[in-house]
Image (tube, rainbow, N blue to C red):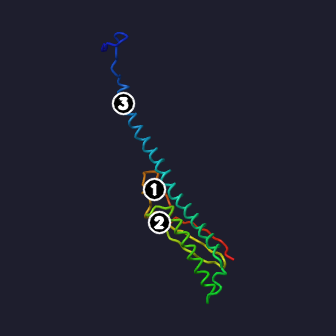
Amino acid sequence: MRQVASPIGDTNIKPPSGRLRGQRGAAAIEAALLFVIFFTLFYAIVSYSIPMMMMQVFNHAASAGARAGVAVERSYFDDEENAEAAYLTGVEARVRDVVEAFLDDTLLPSARANADVNLTWDNDILIVTVRYAGYRANPLVPILRFPVIGDVPRVPDDLIGRAAVQVL
């Protein structure tokens, strides 16, 4: 034993025993394992929230476009030679303008470049679809491959937002 001078008097300090000497690196190993787990959880939260947010933006943009399609006045095109075709062209132009303006205001330029707007007609129902094709191949947040867990995030190939409205 070794004697050490302290303000309260001399104290004896015992050297670490064999059992304590073996425990010195255990805390570092546990901290490293916990870091991996917490980092994976944090990364999963961030990387899953971005595609979900984008899908909500696409749904909202498609809904705004569908509402804009309903707002186009059919009687405005009555004087034209092919009134029905002119009306459909006018609706499609208005819907595309509204959806693209919405996406320009809400998405990053890299995400906006990959977003595609499609319009389809089923009888008098206008279906507006906003699609980010190939999100899995070109994600905004890189996909990490963890052992045992797998890919983080696990996302679909395409992110799609869709809205439908009946145009009378």
Q: Residue furthest bottom?
A: 81
Q: Residues within 10 Å of mark 1 (few under 14, many from 20)?
A: few
Q: Position of residue 88 (x, y in %)?
A: 60, 80
Secondary structure state at the residue bearing disc 2: helix
130 to the left or right of 79: left
Graded by Cα atoms within 10 Å as few (under 14), some (14 to 19) or many (20 or more), the crowding at tag 3 reads few
Q: CA distance from mark 1 to mark 3?
A: 34 Å
Mark 2 neighbour class, 10 Å CA radius: few under 14, some 14 to 19, many 20 or more = some
Q: Please name the residue shown 61% across and 78% down the image.
A: 121
Image point (41%, 38%), residue name? 31
In the rendering, at what x and y percent does residue 118 appear?
A: 54, 74
Q: Amino acid at mark 2?
A: Arg
Quarter of the image for the C terminus: give it.
Answer: bottom right
Question: What residue is shown with label 3?
Answer: 24
Of 3 and 101, which appears nearest the observer?
Answer: 101
In the rendered image, the vertical position of residue 23 relative to residue 71, given as above or below: above
Q: Which secondary structure, mark 3?
A: loop
Residue behind mark 1:
151
Count of number-bearing discs: 3
Residue that badge 2 annotates = 112
